Amino acid sequence: MDFDLLIRNAKTRKGGEELTDIGIVGGKIKKIAKNLTGKAEKTIDAEGKLVTESFVNGHLHLCKVYTLDMVGEEALSSYAGGSMGGAMTAIELAAKVKERYDEKWIIENVRKALKLAVKFGNTHIRAFADTDTKAKLEGVKALIKAREEFKDSVEVQVVAFPQDGVVRDPGAEDYVRQAMDLGADVVGGIPWIEYTEEDEKRHIDLMFEIAKKYDKDISMLIDDAGDPTLKTLEMLAVKTIEEGWEGRVTAQHARAMQLYPDPYYRKVEALLKNAKIGVISDPQTGPLHARVIELYNAGVGIALGQDDISDAYYPYGRNNMLEVAFLASHLLWMTTLADMEILYDLITVRAAQALGISDYGLQEGKAAHLVVLREESVREALRNHQEPRRVIKGGRDVTISP
């Protein structure tokens, strides 16, 4: 058997200490077996290091990367302070940067962030672009342009995101529709930012209307504040089931979930399962977070995201999902070997599940999106959280040389 790419002497997460070969043809994993024979256009010797699926980032505000210095720290302290009671204030303060939005400087920041994504083996990103009366379409245009530039090394799913609401920001709905006409991939939303429960429901209804018209998936920032009375996650799940959009909706954050009374949480958990909604948690960017372990144990499509890179909400970030998992290990007290395996799932296979990416996995017949790590175990990979030795996207070696 001949291969386009052959990875030899690979350790896998399920293979124990045994080494195996991975043969790739036409961008797909053709064969996984010991001592594969045949010619290969290119061979990579993993030298006994761990080979896994590449990393998936289900939440990144890509139009905002590297804008912290333009905004200042006031929004940062409001968002991360205490029990996140100032989360809405932080969003309003951060919106000032959008008065200066221009595709020309946004694209340069985006390119910088996506180069880091490739460096750290992050081959799939759900990328949010503010789409409202302040940002207009500048962020969307930059992300669509970058999506095409980087399509061979990282899949960028552009989310048209009405950051300031649609009822409280008249005209934002029209910009979301225009963004879909331009080629955005996903309809966004942030219903909790609206002032009343009626407006929250209206927000969700309008975004579903657009998603159904364009036959697109939905990603919404949900209940991202320290308020246990927020219920837009429940609203989203109910609407998803009513519209038959199961498996096509993702909820980002859902931080208020941590404060829910347990009986109410159980109801929401059941709704999430029935609606097949994926939840992306970003515990490193705020003091509250979704109930990651409970959702995982319940079979909900829970995953981790980067969320921000040096913007008004978070001063760090490298598009490095191993780093995100390393931080989550501490913040969620997930420090056993079994916990580490779960964390690795949350940035690979579970993240793909949450985003509805089906052609993914270290299995024969799946697309070859892989990383060859510098370590031999998940524990060491999380401990070091450094860039992989090799990054494979669609069967092509896209590794960025030092």
Image: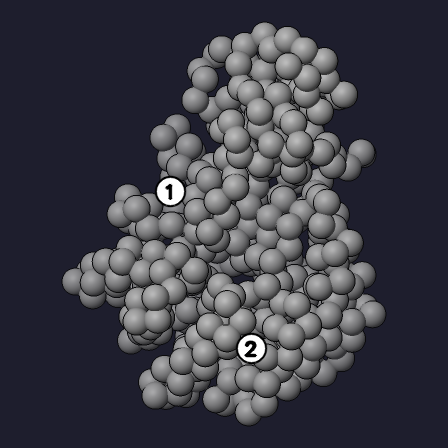
Closer to the camera in the image, 398 or 50: 398
The image shows residue 183, relative to residue 137, as above or below, that is above
Real-space Cα separation, disc 1 to disc 2, in angstroms: 34 Å
Tally the marks: 2
Local packing at callout 1 (Cα closer than 10 Å; few below 14, some 14-19, many 20+) is: few
Under circle 2, the secondary element is loop
Closer to the camera in the image, 313 or 153: 153
- Whether residue 259 sits left or right of residue 362 in the image: it is left
Q: Are marks 1 and 2 in contact (CB under 8 Å)?
A: no
Quarter of the image that includes the N terminus = top right
Q: Amino acid at mark 1?
A: Trp
- Whether residue 373 sits left or right of residue 69 in the image: it is left
The image shows residue 354, relative to residue 322, as above or below, that is below
Q: Tell me what residue is drawn at x 53 percent, y 14 percent.
A: 33
Q: Tell me what residue is drawn at x 74 percent, y 50 percent.
A: 150
Q: In the rendered structure, which disc, 1 or 2, sits on the residue that comes first in sequence?
A: 2
Q: Tell me what residue is drawn at x 48 percent, y 12 percent.
A: 17
Residue 299 location (% of width, % of height) = 30, 46
Residue 55 location (% of width, % of height) = 57, 41
- Whether residue 61 sits left or right of residue 336 in the image: it is right
Closer to the camera in the image, 396 or 198: 396
Quarter of the image that includes the C terminus = top right
Q: Amino acid at mark 2?
A: Pro
- The residue carrying mark 1 is 333
Q: Is residue 251 visible?
A: yes
- Residue 162, numbered label: 2
